[in-house]
Image (tube, rainbow, N blue to C red):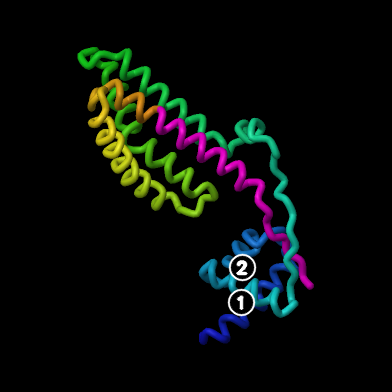
Amino acid sequence: MSNDSKETVLAQIIIQVIKERNPKTVKQLASLVKERLPSHEQEILKSILKLESEGKIRLATQLRPTSLKLVTFLRTEQALWFWATIAIAIATAIAVFTIPEDFYPWVYIRYGLGSVFILWLPGYTFMRALFPEKELDSIERFALSLGVSLALVSIVGLLLNYTPFGIQLAPITLSLLALTIILATTAIIRAHKASLKLEYILKVA
């Protein structure tokens, strides 16, 4: 199928989906169109904008039905990752300072939490803060979180090396705990703001 033919078919499907399924947002429309004609999301969005410029569909705006208060947002399922992250970070710090290295088998809890604390949480919260609207899929987020975590831990260690505290267990633990909490808080605030953004509402002209 040529590009022109595919664009024509795509435009027809978009209009048909709007009339039959009445999607409320561009995102919903793109998902429904993909079910009928496998296409890249950018192609669908480009076709939607072209139809709008031709006057065949109209885009209005409307606020998403979401809470306007951060306190209420923190009680929703969208904030579960935030509370889980904070809980793991605090539990790790407690384990580091309360479980001796020769206290078997409880020390394995310290090792397990410590691994997550170092290899995952800093990068995960950083990526959450950088991409609050789920622009990344699960595999990309996982891979980038690991890489960024290693980079952030290295930077923290380097900075501590030039302080009177040095690279010791307590300063590293407290520094990573503070970094994780700051990044997680930044991420949840950005996620809340993103949930309040205007979203396109579709209507056939």
- Among the 4 quarters of the image, the one containing residue 15: bottom right
Q: Given the image, on which type of amino acid does mark 2 rest?
A: Val
User: What residue sits 35% from the left and 31% below the top?
Assistant: 117
- Is 29 part of what is drawn in magenta? no
Q: CA distance from mark 2 to mark 1?
A: 8 Å
Q: Residue at x 27, y 38 (%)?
A: 154
The magenta stretch spans which residues?
178-205
Around disc 1, counting alpha carbons within 10 Å, would you say few (fewer than 14), some (14 to 19), or many (20 or more)?
many
Is 163 above or below relative to 137? above
* Horizontal side of residue 53 vs 153, given as left or right: right
Q: Which mark is residue 33?
A: 2
Mark 2 crowdedness (10 Å alpha carbons): few <14, some 14-19, many ≥20? many
Residue 191 is labelled as: none
Q: Is residue 42 above or below residue 11?
A: above
Q: Nearer the viewer, residue 118 or 21?
A: 118
- Tell me whether the residue at label 2 lies in contact with that at label 1, contact meaning CB atoms closer than 8 angstroms: yes
